[in-house]
Amino acid sequence: MNQFRFSRRPDIGDKVRVSFEFFPPKTDEMEVRLWDTVTRLEPLKPRFVSVTYGAGGSTRERTARTVRRILNETTLTPAAHMTCVDAARHQVDAVISEFAEMGVTRFVALRGDPAAGVGTAYRPHPEGYANGAELVGALKSAGDFDISVSAYPEKHPESPDFATDIDMLKRKVDNGATRAITQFFFDNDLYERYVERARRAGIYIPIVPGILPVHNFTQVANFSSRCGALVPAWLAERFEGLENDPQTHALVASAVAAEQVHDLVERGVGDFHFYTMNRADLVFAVCHMIGIRSHESEATGSAAA
Ligand code: FAD
């Protein structure tokens, strides 16, 4: 496939459910941007919004603060990401308790990247949980939580082959994962093939595509090569020459992401997880194009297809 098939159906919003991912802000300025984004996306009524967790628990306080604020100040349901990096089991268990006491019922359980950086060998903490599957087990024994885990349509870069990768996903499901959210990808055929592999291995939980609207193609291309995601030539061509033209770049980016989602809907997918990068515009535009409208726009009749 060199590009997505484009559905001509005007409104598929009634079939589609979305969730949004945020990261905890580092500065006051970033905090303002995050809350502007949350306020803009909240009326789209996502199933949940997730908040990432930095390597080695480096964002633990900020993740907790962001999750608490979502609980206290919005109608949204937060999902707290957690990792196993550089933490003993009792420390991870304490973080789980802290979130549970706050009222968190959803988690995204991850092993996390090596503390020394992506590309270096992962060394579990000697008294810690070794991987995502063990963390899922810990969460499951701590409460009746909704637990999402990661999945990699192009396999995790550390996995020697797809069989090993799928086996790890199976272990997470066996330990109690309720949903997998994928690493971003741009070739829907790869996603479809991965889901087929998972189903053949007896994995029946939803495998929700992670959609990354491309805010900055150059950055995405660099990041993709580190995390093993393919950037197809047709995608590079779409953004070619737009490095200094942010407006056109954004228009192209929202069209590309909407096409990708439309194509996945055509293939029977109903749930989507958006990597927002704490920015609302592209995600809002894509949601609009797939028929997900805010309460306000329905009230003014602008949702009419
Ligand atoms: P796992 O699923 O535990 O393992 C990844 C792969 O490594 C497996 O597929 C397996 O093939 C191999 N592997 C691991 N252990 C073994 C073993 N014992 N034997 C054989 N093979 C093994 N990172 C953050 O730091 N914070 C976040 O909030 C965050 N959120 C994310 C959300 C999503 C949806 C995704 C897809 C990724 C996220 N990441 C996050 C990145 C993630 O932490 C990295 O990709 C990390 O390298 C792997 O974590 P994991 O939970 O996917 O690992």
Image (cartoon, rainbow, N blue to C red):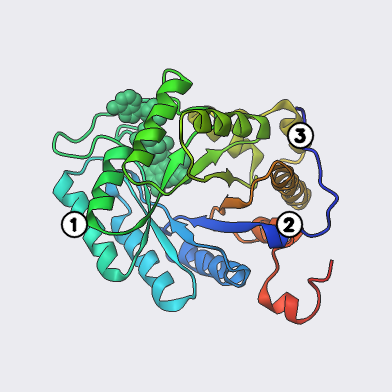
Give how far apart the Cα atoms at labels 2 and 1 are.
Answer: 40 Å
Please name whichever residue, 15 or 281, is drawn nearer the observer in this view of the structure.
15
Horizontal arrangement in the rendering, residue 282 relative to residue 245 (left or right): left
Quarter of the image where one finds residue 84: top left
Q: Earlier in the sequence, mark 2 or mark 1?
A: 1
Secondary structure beneath dot 2 equals loop
Amino acid on which the number 1 mark rests in the picture: Ala
Give how far apart the Cα atoms at labels 3 and 2 are.
Answer: 26 Å
| Ligand 1 located in image quadrant | top left
Please name whichever residue, 163 or 51, is drawn nearer the observer in this view of the structure.
163
Secondary structure beneath dot 1 equals helix
Instruction: Name the residue at the top extreme.
Output: 160
Q: Earlier in the sequence, mark 1 or mark 3?
A: 1
Q: Is mark 3 within 8 Å of ligand 1?
A: no
The residue identified by callout 3 is: 240
Q: Residue at x 35, y 63 (%)?
A: 105
Circle number at residue 94: 1
Amino acid on which the number 2 mark rests in the picture: Ile
Q: Position of residue 298 (x, y in %)?
A: 74, 76
Q: Position of residue 250 (x, y in %)?
A: 73, 51
Secondary structure beneath dot 3 equals loop
Q: Name the front one of labels 3 and 2.
A: 2
Tell me the quarter of the image containing the C terminus: bottom right
* Classed neighbour count for the residue bearing mark 1: other residues with Cα under 10 Å, few (<14), some (14–19), many (≥20): few
Give how far apart the Cα atoms at labels 1 and 3 are.
Answer: 48 Å
Q: Position of residue 117 (x, y in %)?
A: 35, 32
* Classed neighbour count for the residue bearing mark 2: other residues with Cα under 10 Å, few (<14), some (14–19), many (≥20): many
Q: Residue at x 60, y 45 (%)?
A: 212
- Determine whether label 2 and label 1 are within 8 Å by CB: no
Quarter of the image where one finds residue 289: bottom right
Circle number at residue 290: 2
Q: Residue at x 23, y 56 (%)?
A: 142
